Amino acid sequence: MDFPEPTVPGDRADVLLRYLDYFRGCVTEKIRSLPAHAQVASVLPSGWTPLQLAVHLRYMERRWLVWGFVGEPVDDPWGDAPDGQWVVPIGMSGDGVLAALLSQGERTRDIVTAAHLHDIGAPGPRWDGGAPATLERVLLHVLQEYARHLGQLDVVVELTTGDTGE
């Protein structure tokens, strides 16, 4: 997957979506590069697994864009960590986890292309009584989540297979 070069033309929303697609794609590629047993095992003291990370990223993206910005009710918005630890839903395969993450990315793209970056999110429980954020602010938050977690996943892949990032 090619890094979204800063010289490629596009408006800010398009640029932010390309970065999100890039980070999401890198997460799925890195997880798929791991043997199946390593996708569900932790090599870190914190105990999370690569597939749990993917579930977290999907829920995080859904919380910020669907539940937060759009204001749609979602079932169990914190379902990625019901007891404070990330989980993979019972019965969900690795392919299912990654397909759900990519599907959430498509939903994000639909939301962003139907709005403007300066649009303010719908009031609702996501904002804990505070003022809703603009779409641009939401996307910047989601981007930093992906970038941070992709870096953590780089370390997991290196510890597991010896492969390094870029």
Image (cartoon, helix red, strand yellow):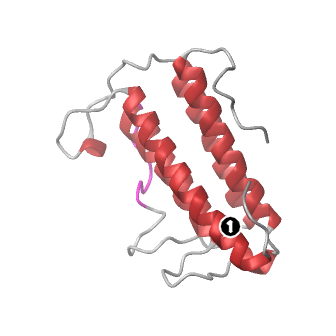
Looking at the picture, how far across and down is residue 123, in whole percent? 26, 32
Q: Main secondary structure of the magenta part?
A: loop
Q: Is residue 144 left or right of residue 120?
A: right
Q: Does residue 155 appear anywhere in the picture?
A: yes
Q: Is residue 90 shown above or below 141?
A: below
Image location of residue 147, percent across then percent down? 55, 50
* Secondary structure found at label 1: loop
Q: Residue furthest left?
A: 129
Q: Is residue 161 left or right of residue 15?
A: right
Image coordinates for residue 154, horizontal then vertical, percent? 66, 64
Dot 1 corresponds to which residue? 92
Across the whole image, how many numbered discs are drawn on residues? 1
Q: Which residues are magenta?
A: 70-78
Q: Quadrant of the C terminus?
A: bottom right
Which residue does the image show at 79% across and 62% down from the upper left?
Answer: 32
Which residue is located at x 48 percent, y 63 percent? 80
In terms of depth relative to the viewer, which is nearer, 51 or 161? 161
Residue 93, x across and y down, in percent: 73, 67
Q: Nearer the viewer, residue 154 or 31?
A: 154
Q: Is residue 78 above or below residue 101?
A: below
Say if the magenta span includes residue 73. yes
